[in-house]
C-alpha cells in the first residue's frame, strides 16, 4: 500500500506541480485509441523488430548511420528564437550521446559498463533542403501562439501557428517552441506513415542551457530514442513493471527523478536484481546530469527501426561530409563530483590523478602535489 501511495504521489506531483518529462506515451496512446491504421501497424512492431534482429545477426558491424536533421524554431518572443549556437550544441550532445563520446560515461556503474553502447548513429544539420537548395538545416517561424499543446500537434502545422515539416523519409524534423507543461515528445515508428512524424522539444531544454535540471540536451536524446523505437525502461505505461522489449535493461517499476544513488530500488517488481534501476539510462526521467548511457540491446532495437521503418536514411546524401564533434562550453561551470581513474566518486586526495566533472559536461584531470 505504501508503494502504491508513493507512486500516486509522484504522478500527481509531476502532473500538477512540475514540467512533464515526456509526452510520447500520451501521444502514442491517443493515436492507438483514435487511429485504427496506426493501432494495427503498432501492434506488429515488436514482433517485426524481433524477427529482423534474428534474421540480421551481423547488423552490429554495419557502418555509421548519419541522420539529417532540420530544426524548426517556432517563436513568439525573442527568447524563444534560440541561437544557432544553442542549436549546434544540441547536435553536439546527440552525437556524443549516441556515439558514447559523452564524458560522463565515466559515471556508468561498473556492472553496466560492458553493455554501454556506441550506437554508431550520428546526426547532422541538413545542408540541402527538399528543393535541392543549400540550407543550414534551421528554419525560423514567428507565431502568434503563446504556447503549443501536444493534443493537436499544432506546432507542426502552418494553419495552427506552426510550420510544416520536411519530408520525414529524408529528414528528422525537430520542432523547438514553447510547450504546455512538457519538456518534449516524439512520434514512434511503424509501417503507418505518420503525417506529423518528428520530435518536439521545449526551447528551454534544447541544447546546452541554464536550466539546472534539464539544461544539458538530454531531452532530445531521450525523445530521439523514442523516434528510433525505444520505450521507457518501465514499459509503455506508467509505473507498470512493464517490458521495454530490451533484454539487457533491468525490469523497472516506475520512472526515476532527480539524481538517485546506485543501487536504486533493488529487487523491485519481484525480481532478484540487486543492482536496481538503470536510472542513468537516457530512457529514464532523471536529471540530465545523471544520464549517461544507451545499452547494446537498445542500440540493436534502434538500428532495427532504421532498417525497417526509416530505411531511406541509410542511403541519404543530404548531409555531405562528416559531422564534427564540437566542444561547446559554458563560461561558468559548477563542479559536480570528483572521481578516480576507476570512475568512483572520491574526495580530493594528493599525489594521485583525479578527474573533476563539471555541470557543462567538461572534465579536468588534476594531480595535487604535496
Image (tube, helix red, strand yellow):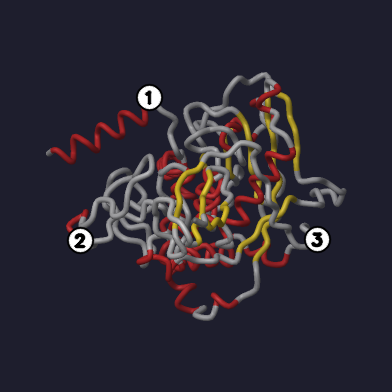
* Picture disc at residue 69: none
Res. 290 visible in picture? yes
| Disc 1 from disc 2: Cα separation | 32 Å
User: Which residue is depicted at the point 57% across and 27% down?
Assistant: 148
Please state, as top left, top right, bottom left or bottom right, where the N terminus lies in the image: top left
- Most extreme residue toward the right is 133
State the residue in front, 200 or 45: 200
Instruction: Find the distance from the CA under tag 2 to the CA under tag 3.
Output: 48 Å
- Neighbour tally class for label 3: few under 14, some 14-19, many 20 plus, Cα within 10 Å: few
Of residues 157 and 15, which is closer to you in this image? 15
- Would residue 103 appear left or right of 157 to someone viewing this image? left
The residue that appears at 66% across and 27% down in the rendered structure is: 80
Which badge, 1 or 3, comes first in the chain's sequence? 1
| Element under disc 2 | loop
In front of the other: 14 or 106: 106
360 lies above or below 99: above
Residue 246: % across, % down: 39, 64
Among the two numbered marks 2 and 3 on one chain, the one whose residue lies closer to the N terminus? 2
**Residue 196, quarter of the rendered image:** top right
Q: Which residue is mark 1?
A: 17
Residue 178 in picture, x, y percent from top left: 59, 27
Q: Tell me if mark 2 has few (under 14), some (14-19) or many (20+) residues whose alpha carbon lies within 10 angstroms of its own.
A: few
Q: Is residue 360 left or right of residue 274?
A: right
Residue 271 is labelled as 2
Q: Residues within 10 Å of mark 1 (few under 14, many from 20)?
A: few
Q: Which of the labelled discs sits on residue 320, or is there none?
A: 3
Q: What distance separates the C-alpha of mark 1 from that of mark 3?
A: 45 Å
The answer to whether any part of residue 40 appears in the image is no
Instruction: Report the front residue among 173 and 12.
Output: 12
Tag 3 secondary structure: loop
Amino acid at each position: 500500500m505504501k508503494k502504491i501511495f508513493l507512486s500516486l504521489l509522484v504522478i500527481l506531483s509531476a502532473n500538477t506541480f512540475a514540467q512533464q518529462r515526456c509526452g510520447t506515451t500520451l501521444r502514442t496512446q491517443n493515436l492507438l485509441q483514435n487511429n485504427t491504421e496506426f493501432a494495427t501497424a503498432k501492434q506488429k512492431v515488436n514482433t517485426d523488430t524481433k524477427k529482423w534482429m534474428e534474421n540480421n545477426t551481423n547488423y552490429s558491424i554495419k557502418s555509421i548511420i548519419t541522420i539529417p536533421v532540420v530544426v524548426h524554431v517556432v517563436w513568439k518572443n525573442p527568447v524563444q528564437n534560440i541561437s544557432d549556437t544553442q542549436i549546434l550544441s544540441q547536435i553536439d550532445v546527440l552525437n556524443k550521446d549516441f556515439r558514447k563520446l559523452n564524458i560522463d560515461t565515466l559515471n556508468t556503474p561498473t556492472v553496466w559498463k560492458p553493455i554501454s553502447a556506441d550506437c554508431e548513429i550520428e546526426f547532422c544539420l541538413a545542408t540541402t533542403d527538399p528543393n535541392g537548395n543549400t540550407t543550414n538545416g534551421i528554419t525560423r517561424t514567428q507565431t502568434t501562439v503563446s504556447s503549443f499543446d501536444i493534443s493537436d500537434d499544432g506546432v507542426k502545422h502552418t494553419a495552427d501557428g506552426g510550420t510544416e515539416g520536411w519530408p520525414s523519409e529524408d529528414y528528422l524534423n525537430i520542432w523547438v517552441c514553447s510547450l504546455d507543461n512538457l519538456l518534449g515528445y516524439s512520434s514512434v515508428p511503424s509501417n503507418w506513415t505518420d503525417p506529423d512524424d518528428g520530435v518536439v522539444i521545449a526551447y528551454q531544454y534544447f541544447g546546452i542551457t541554464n536550466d539546472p535540471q534539464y539544461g544539458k540536451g538530454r531531452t532530445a536524446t531521450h525523445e530521439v530514442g523514442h523516434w528510433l523505437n525505444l520505450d521507457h525502461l518501465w514499459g509503455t505505461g506508467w509505473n507498470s513493471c512493464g517490458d521495454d522489449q530490451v533484454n539487457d535493461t533491468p525490469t523497472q517499476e516506475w520512472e526515476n527523478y532527480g539524481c538517485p544513488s546506485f543501487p536504486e530500488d533493488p529487487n523491485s517488481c519481484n525480481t532478484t536484481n540487486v543492482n536496481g534501476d538503470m536510472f542513468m539510462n537516457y530512457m529514464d526521467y532523471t536529471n540530465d546530469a545523471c544520464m549517461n548511457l544507451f545499452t547494446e540491446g537498445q542500440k540493436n532495437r534502434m538500428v532495427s527501426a532504421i532498417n525497417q521503418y526509416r530505411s531511406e536514411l541509410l542511403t541519404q546524401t543530404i548531409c555531405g561530409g562528416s559531422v564534427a564533434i564540437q566542444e561547446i562550453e559554458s563560461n561558468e561551470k559548477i563542479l559536480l563530483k570528483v572521481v578516480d581513474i576507476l570512475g568512483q566518486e572520491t574526495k580530493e586526495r594528493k599525489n594521485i590523478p583525479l578527474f573533476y566533472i563539471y555541470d557543462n559536461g567538461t572534465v579536468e584531470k588534476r594531480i595535487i602535489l604535496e
